[in-house]
Amino acid sequence: MTYTVSKLHKRLQELTEDCTSILEVGCGKGDILQVLRGRGQRLVGVDVWMPYLEWAPHPDVTYIKASAEETPFMFPKHSFDAVLMIDFVEHLPKDAALKLMRDIEMVAKRIIIMTPEGFMKQEDDIWSYTANGLVNKAQFHLSGWNIEDFAGLEYKVEIMDGYHRTHPYSETKNALLAFKDFTTEVM
């Protein structure tokens, strides 16, 4: 059975239902945060590309322009119940993404990551990440991930069958939904 966007949204709502504060790293236009709003939580989105943030004018979400590498050091320890990185880690070299995952533990009580399973090559002529003639080079995939990458870091992993597509007519590719809780003893 193919995993749909609505199923992803439902699963993210389940994983964050006890959260009063959520940070999304690489939030893009804020679509995921929009799905999660409405329960009185503090929502913060961080993205490096300003045109995305300009397209995300939601008054109940705070948007910040910053790089992923800066993000863990912008907030006090334990300041978010959940940190999301949805369709994000594959846009970093794997060593940089692993460092970010370690660093973001400082501010998170739970980390939730979604990424394609394996390396997903993008079709340059299909994905058009532009605004006002500018190309968002941060959108290109630089790493691939598998279950073992997350399991080795003690994340729980769920497979999202057929979630990703590289082209409207291409075969679907699975995604991984990985999540990990941190106790105050660990932090």
Image (cartoon, rainbow, N blue to C red):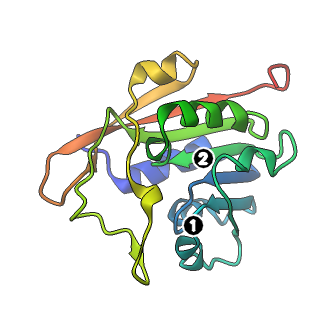
Could you tell whether 120 is left or right of 84 in the image? left
Q: Quadrant of residue 154?
A: top right
SS at mark 1 in the image = helix
Most distant residue in the top direction: 152
Question: Mark 2 highlights which residue?
Answer: 84
SS at mark 2 in the image = strand
Residue 161 in sight in this render: no
Question: Mark 1 highlights which residue?
Answer: 34
Residue 86 in the image, given as x and y percentages of width and height: 50, 48
Name the residue nearer the viewer: 75 or 15. 75
Could you classify mark 2 by the number of other residues whose Cα lies within 10 Å: few (under 14), some (14-19), or many (20 or more)?
A: many
Looking at the rendered structure, the kind of residue marked 2 is Leu
Residue 40 in the image, given as x and y percentages of width and height: 75, 63
Could you classify mark 1 by the number of other residues whose Cα lies within 10 Å: few (under 14), some (14-19), or many (20 or more)?
A: some
Vertical order, 54 against 71 (above or below): below
Looking at the rendered structure, the kind of residue marked 1 is Gln
Residue 179 in sight in this render: yes
Q: CA distance from mark 2 to mark 1?
A: 13 Å
Residue beneath the point at 57% across and 19% down: 153
Residue 36 in the image, given as x and y percentages of width and height: 60, 59
Residue beneath the point at 83% across and 39% down: 78
The image quadrant where one finds the C terminus is top right
Could you tell whether 19 is left or right of 128 in the image? right
Name the residue nearer the viewer: 180 or 71. 71
Residue beneath the point at 74% across and 36% down: 109
